[in-house]
Image (spheres, helix red, strand yellow):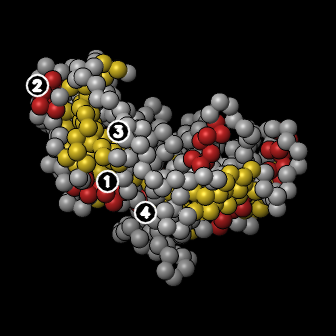
Amino acid sequence: YAAARPLFAFTELGGTWRPFFGDDRVVLWLDRRTWLPLEWQVFPAPGRERNLWEQRFELPPEHPSRAVFEVRAVNVSREPPRPGTFRIEAGPDDVETEGVRRVPLASLAEEIGYEPVAPEAVDGLPLYQAVVPTEPAPATPDAVVTYASGLSWVKLAERRTEAGTGGGDGEPGGRAEGGAEAAAGPPFGPVSPLAEEVALPGGGVAYYEPATEEAGRRLLIHAEGTDLLLETNLPREELLRIAANLPVQGLPAPPSWFRGEGEGLRVSLEEAAARAGFVPLVPAALPEGYVLASVELLPGGDGPGGLEPGAGGGRPGGILLHIRPEDSVVGGAWIRVFQQPADELPPATAADVREVEVRGAAGRWSPERSQLEWLEAGLYLSVDAPGASLDDLLAVAASLEPLAASPGASAAPTPGEVPAGTPSGSSVPTPSGSPAAAAAEGA
């Protein structure tokens, strides 16, 4: 259900009809020719976690073999709708709504004080509109240009910095002449740890985030003197091709963009191992369709929300792996693997905690947090994923293998290098790079 949730949006209009468990099984029938959803059914997931969930929502016992919800298409028309059914009348320019003002593309440069990256068409999509904020503010684009045709759309947001600024770690940057001073940090708000550094087809790098329930696929491009944010409902490959055709060269983003107050530093997996001072465990193979989006090096005593193994000075730093589906994170489908030197498990903070065996050692399972914890080889390890079952997390834990080269070794492993004990044909799912690593190499 967590992955199929967009099919159930209508159940939340005017009140939810009934709740569903994240692991409930959804059987979906599609029309072979048009891919139109024709029927879908929900079957309860088996297991104690589902039974406890039923009690919490005061539901009767629901057997996994019986569908508890069913939707069936009873009338489908392939005929074109009447003219004007979905037509939205174009309004005048210079209309203010929701904090932005629409302006003609021809006068956009005059409005923002510089010539924007705004082609007449993007990947065959014509220009729809250009808007500027009514009042400049931190993490707000100077302008957003939208291209659309039918149900396909691309938004191109831009925020300009003065030449030579904004490229260093923590540099505040600036605006074009006549604009407000830019705030320090990422130009469009915090960059998610699920953002993956990718190589653009024409050269350069960008930072890709898959679609969510609230936003389309996004691509952040940090270039000399300007920053761009592309958002679209087109496939990932088309988004990357659009970015490659823009007249900018993507550069590694400043490390400060990837860390906020109390958060870790985004680095490569090899740099995290070298700086943390221990050999981390990494998945020898990820679940199908998943990628390792980023690696964070956390300061001593810190851990991500809900994973903190203990507070206090002197505790060694930890490593946090962010793993997510390649194309969509609808339903919060991500996995975090945290590890840190420790001699004992931290005190349990969840009400419902159970003892389980993990990789031959005594561990702990918290259904409320979907979190698995255990000690191994002098490390505290934790795996958590929203809505994941115990079997799901045990499978991730079972796939962990030591990184091939130990910290301080003369040659660091390269992305894709096989760690010791990895089955033939498997590879370490290493991120394509990191801004911190790039900055270190440049220094």
Residue on which the image places disc 3: 257
Helix, strand or loop at label 2? It is helix
Distance from the alpha carbon under mark 2 to that under mark 3: 29 Å
Observer able to see residue 278 = no
- Which mark identifies residue 239? 1
Q: Give amino acid for label 2.
A: Glu
Q: Is residue 104 left or right of residue 305?
A: left
Distance from the alpha carbon under mark 3 to that under mark 4: 20 Å
Residue on which the image places disc 4: 430
Q: Is residue 63 left or right of residue 415?
A: right
Give coordinates of residue 163: x percent, y percent. 12, 35
The mark closer to the camera, 1 or 3, is 1
Foreground of the two, 178 or 216: 216
Query: Which residue sits at x=63%, y=60%?
Result: 28
The mark closer to the camera, 4 or 1, is 1
Q: Residues within 10 Å of mark 3 (few under 14, many from 20)?
A: many
Q: Earlier in the sequence, mark 2 or mark 3?
A: 2
Helix, strand or loop at label 1? It is helix
Give coordinates of residue 370: x percent, y percent. 69, 49
Q: Earlier in the sequence, mark 4 or mark 1?
A: 1
Distance from the alpha carbon under mark 2 to that under mark 4: 44 Å
